[in-house]
Image: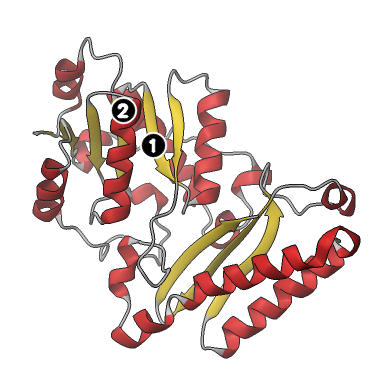
Amino acid sequence: MKIISDIQELRDHLRGQNRASFVPTMGNLHEGHLSLMRLARQHGDPVVASIFVNRLQFGPNEDFDSYPRTMQADIDKLEKEGVYILFAPTERELYPQPQEYRVDPPQQLGDILEGEFRPGFFKGVCTVVLKLISCVQPKVAVFGKKDYQQLMIIRQMAKQFALPVDIIPAETIRAEDGLALSSRNGYLSITERAEAPTLQRTLQEVREQVLDLGPNKMNMSALDAIEKKALSELTQRGWQPDYITIRRQADLVPASDENLQAGESLVILTAAKLGKTRLIDNLEI
């Protein structure tokens, strides 16, 4: 595996490679990330991964400085997966001058849910993803469905900017007890780690309650009651939920009674703190 930090050197190595697949990461790799590498290989060759902890997507009180950085362990894992190039730029290389040009997603998608609780997050994500895609110039790029809203925003960005790249979604990888794999799971204490799978079980319960409604009782009032019950139960168990909400898969806005009667595809999304660790998850219906 070639480890490259220079943009021009990266382009030199990839010159003539018009089927490259790309997986951008912030490092501290786990099985979820490695599954993205395997999916990327199915859609293109060679496989290029990046590791860059992007300052632009962290808020002033978030964990940029303490975000886990495990470069050597990450290199070992990527080599075992047969990744061709690891692009690991420094901040000075990727942002040689202040990044004054930013990609700002539309408010109706970027300022809801995660965008409401993490102002500026998606602007930082879109800006770095656009820049990384410009550096790598891949045929396909793979993103996990655990970050459901992020995936949707990046797909729309690629479409609206006519980027010559296909955005491939990857299913969420979970631990045996159901917890979605995340680099931030390492922040959990032993007691918190034992409680953490409750988040996914809550999503399963919400899904079952929605499906049990049937077409005759499927309306916004019923969904609102299910959401409030789930929020209350998480709070009683010591969680600090930001949201647990049932939205349309198509655009993440609440479904209307009319659309629900028509059998609209839904997704349940949640974000909640357990101790000091903020976890997100989702489940499609």
Rounded to the nearest angstrom, the CA distance separating label 1 from label 2 is 8 Å
Residue at position x 35%, y 79% in the image: 193
Q: Which residue is mark 1?
A: 142
For mark 1, does the 10 Å Cα neighbourhood hold few (<14), some (14 to 19), or many (20 or more) residues? many
Q: Which residue is mark 2?
A: 21
Q: Secondary structure at mark 1?
A: strand
- Residue 109 coordinates in the image, percent (x, y): 64, 45
Identify the image quadrant of residue 230: bottom right
Q: Quadrant of the C terminus?
A: bottom right
Amino acid type at mark 1: Val
Residue at position x 57%, y 39% in the image: 105
Residue at position x 37%, y 83% in the image: 194
Residue 151 shown left or right of residue 20 in the figure: right
- Residue 46 coordinates in the image, percent (x, y): 22, 25
Residue 177 sits above or below residue 96 on the image: below
- Residue 126 coordinates in the image, percent (x, y): 46, 38
Q: Earlier in the sequence, mark 1 or mark 2?
A: 2
**Mark 1–mark 2 contact, CB under 8 Å?**
yes
Amino acid type at mark 2: Ser
Residue 173 sits above or below residue 4 on the image: below
Residue 17 shown left or right of residue 266 in the figure: left
Q: Secondary structure at mark 2?
A: strand
Q: Quadrant of the N terminus?
A: top left
Task: In the rendered structure, find residue 67 and report the number of the disc placed on it.
Answer: none
